């Protein structure tokens, strides 16, 4: 999510959430890891390529276990409970626009 949307959600939950509340602050669902990697590569001007599990393990080390998995998250309950409505640019749009903090 965009940093301004994160700040809004943080404020809403600081004001309204009880201790121990679990939230999912995702502005968009279903963004594939591959698409994120390609967006970063585009900004950096480096090529991307697909790797099989063995090659990924050699390239990414322990991080490889995460690159091939799906971690779905939904903010539906967070939006309903706190009236949160993210409005900033999506992750891929922000990545490829290059408008992000260093």
Image (tube, grey):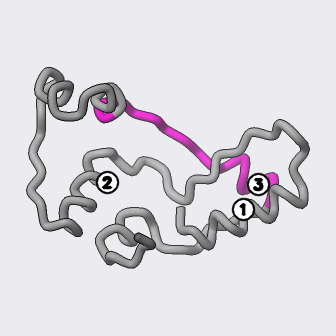
Q: Are marks 3 and 1 in contact (CB under 8 Å)?
A: no
User: Could you classify mark 2 by the number of other residues whose Cα lies within 10 Å: few (under 14), some (14-19), or many (20 or more)?
Assistant: some
First-in-chain label (3 vs 2): 2
Q: In this figure, which residue is indicated by the disc labeled 2?
A: 36
Side (left or right) of 47 relative to 4: left
Q: Residue at x 81, y 56 (%)?
A: 13
Q: Which residues are magenta?
A: 67-82
Q: Residue furthest top?
A: 54
Q: Viewer-nearest of labels 3 and 2?
A: 2
User: Could you classify mark 3 by the number of other residues whose Cα lies within 10 Å: few (under 14), some (14-19), or many (20 or more)?
Assistant: few
Q: Residue at x 72, y 62 (%)?
A: 9
Label placed on residue 9:
1
Q: In this figure, which residue is indicated by the disc labeled 3?
A: 80
Residues 95 and 82: in front is 95
Q: Quadrant of residue 27?
A: bottom right
First-in-chain label (3 vs 1): 1
Quick one: SS at disc 2?
A: helix
Q: Position of residue 66 (x, y in %)?
A: 36, 31
Q: Label 1 vs label 2: CA separation?
A: 23 Å
Instruction: Examine the rendered structure and indicate whether residue 30 appears above or below residue 99.
Output: above
Q: Quadrant of residue 99?
A: bottom left
First-in-chain label (1 vs 2): 1
Q: Label 3 vs label 2: CA separation?
A: 27 Å
Instruction: Examine the rendered structure and indicate whether residue 34 appears above or below residue 72.
Output: below
């Amino acid at each position: 999510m965009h940093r301004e949307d994160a700040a809004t959600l943080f404020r809403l939950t600081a004001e309204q959430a009880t201790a121990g509340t679990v939230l999912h602050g995702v502005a968009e669902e279903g963004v594939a890891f591959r698409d994120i990697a390609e967006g970063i590569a585009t900004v950096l001007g480096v090529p991307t390529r697909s790797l099989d599990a063995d090659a990924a393990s050699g390239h990414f080390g322990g991080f490889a276990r995460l690159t091939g998995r799906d971690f779905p998250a939904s903010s539906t309950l967070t939006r309903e409970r706190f009236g949160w409505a993210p409005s900033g640019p999506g992750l891929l749009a922000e990545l490829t626009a290059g408008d992000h903090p260093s």
